[in-house]
Every structure is written in C-alpha cells, then in structure tokens.
Image: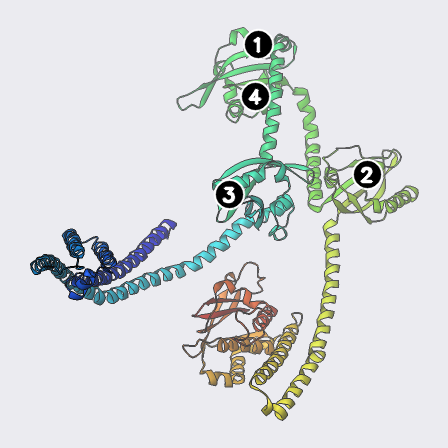
C-alpha cells in the first residue's frame, strides 16, 4: 500500500474521530442547553416572585402606615424604590433573549414609577394638626389599587408565558436526557471499531517497517555518500540561538572519506568533529536550513591528511534536526580544474597557430609526410558515405603521381577508390564518429612494388586530417623485433601486476655508484609517483623510521662489506606521513661487468599490525579469564559466607524473639530477610552467568523433549499454584550442553509464570519449526544452512517493543523489585547460553498482550 493511501486512510480516520467526538460534544451541549433553559425559566419564576413580593408591600396597611409616619417615611420610600429597581434590572437581565417577555418590562417599569409617585403623594400628606379627610384618603387608595391591579395583570401574563416555556423546555430536556447516553454509547463503540481496524492495519505493516529499516540501514552502509543526522544545541543564554549541532547518526562513509569511526563520533558535536565548517560557512548553512525549514546545497573544499577533497553537500530539514548528505566531488573538481587549464593552454596554442600559419604552409611543403584533409559527405540517414578532398600537400605527387591542385574538391571515391576495400574508409569514419585519433598502417602497391605507410587520422570539424609517412624500411625492422617485444611486454605486465597484488616492489642497487632502480610499485609503496625522485641508498634512507635507522645503517654496512644479504624487517614513513613495515631480501649478481644487488621489498604492515592485535587480545583474554576465575571464587565462597551467617542469625532472632517485635519492627525484619534472600539469588545468578564458558564445546546429543519434561517437573509447584497451561510441539534433538539447555528452558518458563496476567491463568505455547539461515540477522555468524526455530509464547503482561533488546542486558528490569521478584540476570543467561550454542535469540512483546521469545539453534 502506498504512502498516499495511508495518508488518505489517516485523514479518514481522523475525520471519523472528529465526527464522533463532535457528535458526542454536540449531544452533551444540547443536553446542557436544555438544562440551562429550564434553569433559566426557574430563575425568571423567582424574579417574578420577587416582583410580586415587591408590589404586594404597597397593598399592605402596615407599609402604608410606616410610609405615613413622618419619622421614617423618606428612608422607607427610597429603600422601596431601590428594591424595585433591583427587581426590574434582574428581570431585564434574565429576559434578555426573550422578546415577548421584554415587551412586558417597559409598561411594568412605567407602572412601578407611577406607583412610586402615588406613594410619594401619600407621603406628602401631613397628620400633624388635623387628620386627612376620608374622601381624599379613599381617592388616593383607589389610585394605588388601580396601579397595583395593572401591575398584577402584567405579572400574570409573564407567568403564563414562562409556564408555556417551562413545558417546552422540560419536554426538550427529558428527550435529550433519554437519547444522550444511547448516542454517546453508539459513538464510543463506533470510534472503538475505527481504532481497532486502524491498529490492525498498523500491526500488519509493522513487519514491513522493520524490513524497510533494515534495507535503509543497508543502503546507508553501502552508499558512496556521507549521510549524517544532526540535532541543534541551543545557547541557554540566547533565545533560540543555535550554538552547535549534536551528531545523532553517521554512516560508514565517514570512515571511508574522513577517517572517522561512526560509533565514535555519534553523540559528539559538529564543531568538535568537523571544525572546518566554522571557517568555510558550512555551520551557517546548517542553521539556515533548520531555522527556515528549507533544503540548501553548497560545495566545500576540505583538507584531509594533507590532501584536498571537494564535497557537494545537501542539508535537508528532517524531524527535529537536519539531514546532512555529502557527495565526494573531488574527481569532478579536479576534472574541472584540468579542463580549465587545458582550455587556457588551447587558447594560447590557437594564437600561436594563427601567428605561425605561414610557417605551417612552408612546413607542409618541406616535410616528407603526406598531409591530407577530407570533408565528410553524408547520406540521408546522416551516415558518412564519401569524402571531399579539401587539402593535399605536394608529397602526394612522387607516390601516386597526382597533382594537389587537380584533385582538390574531388571525391575520395574517385581519386583513391582502394580505401573502400583495404579498410582505410572505416578508420576515417571511426576517427570522426568517435572523436578519437586513429592510427593505422596500410600497404600501397605500384608497378608490383609494395610500400607501407603509417597514417594518423584526426577529426577536424566534420572532416578528418590524415598524416601519412613511408615506413617501408621500419616495417621490415619492426617485424623482426615484434615477437621479442610482445614476449617482453607480456612478462613486464605480469610482473607489474604481481607486484601490486602482492604489495611488493623490486629494486636494483648499483653499489659502486649508489644509484638504484626502483619498480613503479616500489615508488607507490613509498607514497610517491613512479620515478618521482632519483633513487639511491642514501635517498631511500630518508624514508626509514628514525627508530630503525641505526639497524638499517648497520645492515647496509654489512651488505656492502660482505656482499651477503639476509631477510630483515624495518619501518618506513611514507611521503604522506604513514608508517609502514617493509620486509626486504635480495642477492648479488654480475651485470655489465659490475656487481649489483637485486631484491624485493614487501609491505607487511597488515601482517605486523594483525600480530600485534592478536598478542594484545590474547593478553586481554588471559587477564579477563583470570579476573573471572577470581570472581567465581569470591562469589562461590567469600560473598556467600556473610549472607549465610546473616540468614542464620535472622532465623535465630525470629525463633527466639519474634513474638516480641512491634508491628513496624516486624515489617523491617521481613525487609531484611527478603533483601538477604534476593542478594543470595543475585550472587547465584551472577555465578551461573559467569560460568557459561563459550570455550567449552563438550557437546552431546540432547533430546529437548526430555529437557522440557525435567524442567516442568522442577517447576511443578509454581505450575500448580498458578494453574499454568503448557502446550508444546514435538521438539528436536540437538548437539549441546544438557545443564545449559535445562537452565535456558527453566528461565523462559519461570519468566512466563512470574509475569502472568491478572485476568487469566498463565498459558505458554512452545512452537517448533525449521528455518533457513536467511531468517537470522546479517551480523550473526551462520554455522548451518538450516536452524531449529523454537518459540516460547505466553499470555502474560508483555512489554513495550522498544525494550526488546534491553531485557537481555544484565541487571536490566522493566519493573520495580517490589512488583516482581528477580535479579535481572535470567534473560542475560539465556542469551549467553544460546550464543554458546552458535545460535540466536530475540524477543517480541506487546504490553498487556504477552511476550514471545524466539530461539534459533543449528540443525
């Protein structure tokens, strides 16, 4: 499936998720809105109730008496007005989006103001001397009652309106309340289905991703380009200022071109490893690419070990950093430089040719060579079918009898028809079409006499210039030497190739004159071009390592004095500063009346370095074995002895004084006992791990079915306590060490039981099949074409796939020791046992689903 398809699927999945989420959100919002509308109606009811309470005061005799009381009437009326203003403001706020109700507010506000005015008039009446006449009081009360009646009528209309809204909102709320849970449940199941399908597709493509990663790593290891990945390091004192880049990944081309080991430079900074980028602007290009998120490319010249190199560099933003790709363009730059020089030289030559044109014409007339220039005549298919003669010098006349001016501008097929028979025509066409000079020899017969001519055809425009010379006499002599030269050429070629392959060089030393003749490969072994310097014993001495000069001079003196040569090895320093080991031998012979020494020098640097590394590794191995044996002795006796005493005294204290412990003391005592037990288990496992010796190969024929039966018998208590189910295929017979295979099976089954799921009893499937060697990773050394593949599959708690390698490391645990017991060595022991049997083990897991341990053993 293409990346576009995955992108479309991802967009659809996200759209479905957003749709289900939005539907759920809208349903909840709708329910909240319904509840809010009901609550809004209740608040309006309360506000109308406050209005009823407010205007009802004006109808009470107590309030009117209080109002007519001159001592308190002013404050009472003002407080009453403020209360009314509050009630009206509250109603206006609550009915802001209800137009019918807002239509009632304006007349209601006018009636309240009218009521306040009538109460003010009542307040202005004095009772200090005479009582108010009865008819005036009756009239005033009638006005107030009439106003209250109008207020009450508006209030009742508002209550009717709210009762109608309440019925609608209650119905909407009940509907939303009943449909919301069902809708949310359906949407949740739909979203779950989408994610299950997506997860299944992702899992199917997981294996393809692993294959792609392996392929990508292979490509990066075999490419001719330097490929690195850098992540920025920001300056803490300057916001978003990049101070450097960290090298996160580097491929093998760093070693090939720059002499840098990828594993050693990863984790370090760019400016530390590539300081030349500071001066030539490369660092600014990295920063620009990262900040502007755009691809940049540039060319840079660097000097590596004194040699200039050119790289064409691409910097591309990638994830949280930049991808650095450098292509070695040294050959191209050198070619450009050579082409530029050649162009300059050609321009100079053209000027010289123009100045010497007259001289050239005189030369053509005076030389013994025949010079001709033909122009191509092409057919319909653009193929050359004939030539037109444009120039012939005077030397043609004595040979063929032709006069140059008479044959000029005529066809070659007319003047020289034989060239279409003797192959000359094909040579001329080849020189034009291939644009390469063509040398050929051709016989010419006249009056029964054979003459040989040697010609060179060179393309000029869409024609060819032929230079011909009479080689009849030379041909006779060359035929005599031809066989000798061919034999000598073959011998020299074979000898030169043999020197390169064997990393050897030959020499001839004239002792009397101190002049030496070195072979081409001898010069190359010294880091020089062939015949770069005049060879001699004294000059060669400059290449000898200073620490070996004394021995070299001594042997030179002995050779000169006794004319006796013995094989010896010494060091030299090449022109580039590299140190090499040379092994030299020779003998004395007589040549042209003088004594000379001939010999051979061989570059044995690789052999010497390999011997040194072998000696060093042997010493390290002996020291490591000694340390391991010492550790075994300590772990077996000295480390376990104090633990045994601690366990003994802990047991005695618990037997004698256990009943006197406090609750906290009992907890502390249990922790001591568990820590001692865990320490003893740790030492035992470490001892088992260290005793797995890969050098012991006392293998025997083992029936793995019997091994499994014994392990299940040893684990009977754990299996029965946890109701563990073990289903196993028929296992093969292998060559191995019995107790190590038992330990391997024990550790894997114990892990499956220990890290069981809380939802179901442990279940372990042991699956067997044969597999080809191609299933094993490339870095594993294969000792067999076919392997036994045994898989332990459990339904336990599993683990994250990123920890698949970590779990095989010593002391590595994915859980706290309080959650699961153990030392973190069991799987490391498994890996060491499998490797000791020339096999391979790896793990796959999924958190909450289970784990699978796959073992490959040679068949």
- Residue 163 at x, y percent in the picture: 14, 63
Q: Which residue is mark 4?
A: 458
Label 4 – label 3 distance at C-alpha: 54 Å
What is the C-alpha distance between the residues marked 3 and 2?
53 Å
Q: Are marks 3 and 2 in contact (CB under 8 Å)?
A: no
* Residue 452 appears in the picture as rendered: no
- Could you tell which of marks 4 and 1 lies nearer the N-terminus? 1
- Earlier-in-chain disc, 2 versus 4: 4
Compare residues 379 and 30 and report the one nearer the observer: 30
Whether residue 666 is visible to the viewer of this picture, yes or no, is: yes
**Residue behind mark 2:** 540
Mark 1 and 3 residues: CB-CB less than 8 Å, in contact? no
**Of the two numbered discs 1 and 3 in the rendering, the one whose residue sits closer to the viewer:** 3
Q: Secondary structure at mark 3?
A: helix
Q: Earlier in the sequence, mark 4 or mark 3?
A: 3
Looking at the rendered image, the disc whose residue lies closer to the viewer, 4 or 3, is: 3
Name the element at disc 4.
strand
Residue located beneath label 3 in the image: 290
Horizontal and vertical percent position of residue 473: 68, 20
Point out the residue furthest to the front here: 129
Residue 306, compared with residue 340, is above or below; it is: below
What is the number of the mark on residue 401?
Answer: 1
**Which of the marked residues, 1 or 3, is nearer the chain's N terminus?**
3
């Amino acid at each position: 499936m293409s990346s576009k398809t995955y992108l479309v699927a991802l967009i659809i999945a996200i759209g479905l998720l957003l749709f289900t989420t939005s539907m759920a959100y809208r349903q909840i919002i709708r329910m909240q809105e319904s509840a809010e509308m009901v609550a809004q109606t209740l608040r309006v009811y309360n506000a109308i109730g406050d209005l009823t309470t407010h205007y009802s005061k004006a109808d009470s005799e107590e309030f009117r008496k209080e109002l007519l009381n001159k001592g308190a009437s002013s404050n009472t009326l003002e407080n009453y007005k403020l209360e009314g203003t509050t009630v009206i403001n509250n109603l206006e706020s609550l009915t802001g989006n209800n137009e019918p109700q807002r239509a009632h507010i304006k007349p209601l506000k006018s009636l309240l103001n009218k009521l306040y005015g009538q109460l003010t008039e009542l307040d202005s009446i004095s009772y200090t001397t005479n009582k108010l006449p009865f008819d005036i009081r009756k009239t005033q009360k009638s006005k107030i009652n009439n106003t209250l009646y109008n207020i009450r009528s508006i209030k009742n209309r508002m209550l009717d309106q709210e009762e109608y809204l309440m019925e609608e909102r209650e119905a909407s709320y009940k509907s939303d309340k009943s449909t919301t849970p069902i809708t949310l449940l359906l949407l949740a199941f739909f979203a779950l289905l989408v994610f299950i399908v997506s997860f299944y597709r992702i899992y199917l493509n997981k294996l393809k991703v692993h294959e792609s990663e392996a392929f990508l790593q292979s490509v990066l290891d075999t490419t001719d380009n330097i490929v690195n990945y850098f992540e920025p390091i920001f300056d803490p004192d300057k916001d978003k200022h990049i101070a450097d880049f960290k090298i996160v990944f580097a491929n093998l081309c760093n070693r090939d071109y720059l002499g840098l080991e990828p594993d050693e430079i990863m984790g370090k900074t760019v400016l530390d490893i590539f300081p030349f980028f500071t001066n030539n602007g490369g660092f600014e290009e990295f920063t620009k690419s990262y900040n502007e998120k755009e691809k940049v490319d540039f060319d840079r010249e660097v000097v590596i070990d004194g040699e200039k190199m050119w790289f064409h560099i691409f910097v591309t933003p990638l994830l949280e950093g930049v991808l650095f790709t450098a292509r070695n363009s040294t050959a191209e730059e050198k070619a450009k430089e050579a082409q530029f020089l050649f162009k300059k030289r050609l321009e100079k030559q053209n000027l010289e040719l123009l100045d010497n044109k007259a001289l050239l014409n005189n030369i053509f007339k005076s030389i013994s060579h025949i010079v001709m220039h033909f122009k191509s005549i092409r057919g319909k298919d653009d193929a050359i079918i004939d030539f037109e003669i444009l120039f012939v010098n005077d030397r043609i006349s004595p040979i063929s009898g032709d006069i140059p001016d008479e044959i000029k501008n005529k066809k070659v097929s007319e003047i020289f028809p034989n060239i279409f028979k003797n192959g000359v025509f094909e040579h001329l066409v080849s020189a034009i079409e291939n644009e390469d000079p063509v040398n050929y020899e051709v016989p010419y017969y006249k009056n029964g006499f054979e003459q040989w001519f040697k010609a060179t055809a060179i393309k000029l425009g869409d024609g060819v210039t032929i230079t011909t010379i009479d080689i009849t006499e030379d041909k006779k002599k060359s035929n005599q030497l031809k066989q000798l030269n061919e034999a000598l050429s073959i011998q020299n070629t074979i000898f030169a190739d043999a020197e390169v392959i064997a990393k050897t060089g030959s020499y001839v030393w004239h002792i009397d004159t101190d002049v030496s003749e070195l072979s081409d490969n001898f010069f190359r072994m010294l880091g020089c071009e062939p015949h770069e310097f005049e060879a001699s014993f004294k000059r060669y001495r400059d290449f000898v390592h200073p620490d070996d000069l004394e021995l070299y001079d001594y042997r030179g003196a002995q050779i000169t004095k006794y004319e006796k040569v013995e094989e010896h090895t010494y060091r030299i320093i090449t022109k580039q500063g590299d140190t090499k080991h040379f092994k030299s031998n020779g003998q004395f012979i007589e040549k042209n009346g003088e004594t000379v020494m001939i010999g051979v020098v061989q570059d044995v640097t690789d052999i010497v370095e390999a011997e040194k590394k072998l000696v060093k590794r042997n010493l390290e191995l002996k020291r490591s074995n000694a340390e391991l044996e010492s550790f075994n002795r300590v772990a077996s006796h000295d480390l376990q002895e104090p633990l045994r005493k601690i366990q003994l005294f802990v047991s005695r204290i618990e037997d004698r004084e256990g009943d006197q412990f406090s609750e906290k003391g009992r907890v502390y005592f249990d922790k001591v006992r568990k820590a001692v037990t865990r320490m003893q288990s740790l030492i035992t496992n470490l001892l088992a791990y260290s005793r797995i010796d890969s050098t012991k190969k006392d293998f025997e024929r083992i029936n793995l079915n019997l091994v499994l039966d014994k392990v299940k018998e040893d684990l009977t208590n754990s299996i029965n306590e946890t109701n563990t189910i073990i289903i196993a295929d028929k296992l093969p017979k292998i060559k191995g060490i019995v107790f190590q295979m038992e330990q391997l099976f024990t550790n894997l089954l114990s892990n499956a039981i220990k890290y069981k799921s809380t939802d179901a009893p442990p279940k372990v499937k042991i699956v067997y099949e044969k597999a080809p060697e191609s299933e094993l990773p490339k870095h594993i050394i294969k000792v067999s074409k076919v392997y036994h593949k045994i898989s332990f599959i459990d339904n336990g708690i599993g683990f994250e796939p990123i920890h698949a390698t970590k779990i095989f490391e010593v002391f590595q645990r994915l859980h706290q020791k309080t959650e699961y017991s153990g030392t973190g060595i069991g799987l490391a022991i498994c890996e060491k046992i499998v490797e000791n049997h020339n096999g391979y083990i790896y793990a796959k897991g999924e958190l909450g689903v289970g784990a699978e341990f796959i073992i490959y053993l040679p068949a």
